[in-house]
Amino acid sequence: MKEERSAQEQAVLVAVEFTGARRRLTESVSQARKAALLREGSDAATDAVASERVSRNTEAIDLDFDASLAEFKELARSAGAEIAATLVQRRARPDPATLVGQGKLEEIAGVTASTNADLVLFDHDLSPSQMRNLETALGVRVIDRTQLILDIFARHARTREGQLQVELAQLEYQLPRLAGRGKAMSQLGGGIGTRGPGETQLETDRRKINLRIDHVKEQLESVRRVRRQQRQRREAVPVPVVALVGYTNAGKSTLFNALTEAGVLESSRMFATLDPKLKQLQLPSRRRILLSDTVGFIRNLPHTLVTSFRATLEEVERAELLLHVRDASSPMLEEQKTEVEKVLGELEVKGKSVIEVMNKIDLLDAEEQQALAREGRVLVSGLTGEGLGELLEAVDRHLIADPVIEMEFRFPQSEGAALAALEAGALLSRRRFEGNLVYLTARGPVSLLSRYRDFRVSMDRTSMGQISIQRGA
């Protein structure tokens, strides 16, 4: 542990807030306030209400920025950095050359030198020219938000597929940032027989990266082909897929372990889960599902990452039901929900059935829990196990594929294998014996009960309406 701590890189964090949006919001509220005063006359109460509205909106912006800064610090720690200093600049618009102003740039350079920092992390995406200018001015490595997230992904990729996806995203990130690397731009060769247009080092590097991108894509397609074959074998037996989705660090892996006892990594670090996990789970109705744990989302998740990790998120695309796991204790609860829905929109899965799972209720008091308990939400704690039974019942109610039905059967006692299969996959009741015959009522998935329709003694019933299975169908 000591060696790991000493190996941590010292980082200066730079967060920039562009106040143009704040000013526009304040101006719009101010104009609304003036219009109200003109309509109602100069009324002190109306004026106070309008002022309070401006104050509330300003506080909301400040809270959002503070939460974003706290999240950026956690990203830096998850990447293994030790935060030497944090600098904030508020300016109307970004500087096209360096993002920050000249005065702030000099301050960053001074802080970097005084703290002996190894790198400077920007909570913002930088253009290739901005990154080059900043590295020249600061004399240390400069990393932007996308590059930082990619580094965390690279740390946590364990499967071959995950590693290929990280490499593809990194290569696509590097490609437009090759230009302007000083001497590396010089002509190749030199001397007799090599003069002429030739190929610059930049062009060579770009060609190599493009070749590598093509090679990685081919390897990824090969991995996906195997996954498709595995999925086709799974789909031969109708087992619905239910996917956990949510903001990073919402407690999805803890909840996944609590439901399945899978023992996957639980960590407060961001993006601790990168490779998808699938585990079979039995519901109260005895129906079986495949539960999938997926990578967490985050605000301003780069589009290239969503594209590169589409294979990882295939289980989300193919799931019949999504469990949107939310950190009930987070002060940015609604903002995080918006970010998750934005990514789901990019994956074109917003039309799927969703259950909102309010996790970490062990951190809330009874009054706060009651305030969150709306229709359609399920309150749970992956840590203590509270509410897990209600969650499984809610999943049972929402699944449409392979619905739960009820049938009455008559089996000869010699059909021990059929009776054992029903015992394992359905709820049995009203069992009675007449001679060598066993009469019973079974409630379970239609895929199971329909296998034994030749032994039924009456039409089946279902809580979802009348579903009839004709003899011999």
Image (cartoon, rainbow, N blue to C red):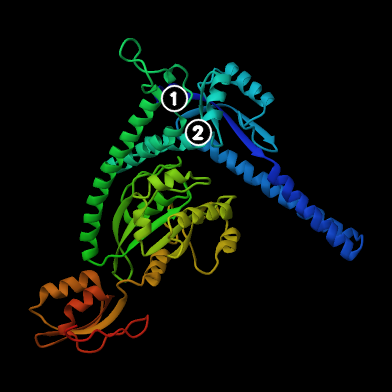
What residue did someone put label 2 on? 76
The quarter of the picture where the N terminus appears is top left
Residue drawn at (46%, 41%) of the image = 270
Q: Quadrant of residue 308?
A: top left
Q: Disc 2 vs disc 1: Cβ atoms closer than 8 Å?
A: no
> Which amino acid is tagged 2?
Ala
Pair 2/1: label in front: 2
Residue drawn at (21%, 55%) of the image = 229
Instruction: In the rendered view, tell whether residue 151 sits above or below residue 293.
Output: above
Q: Quadrant of residue 97?
A: top right
Observer-nearest residue: 317 or 79? 317
> Which amino acid is tagged 1?
Arg
What residue did someone put label 1 on? 5
Instruction: In the rendered view, tell whether residue 182 sits above or below residue 151.
Output: above
Question: Distance of mark 2 from mark 1, alpha carbons?
Answer: 14 Å
Residue 348 in the image: state x and y as whole percent.
43, 59
**Residue lying furthest right:** 42
Instruction: In the rendered view, tell whether residue 114 sits above or below residue 360.
Output: above
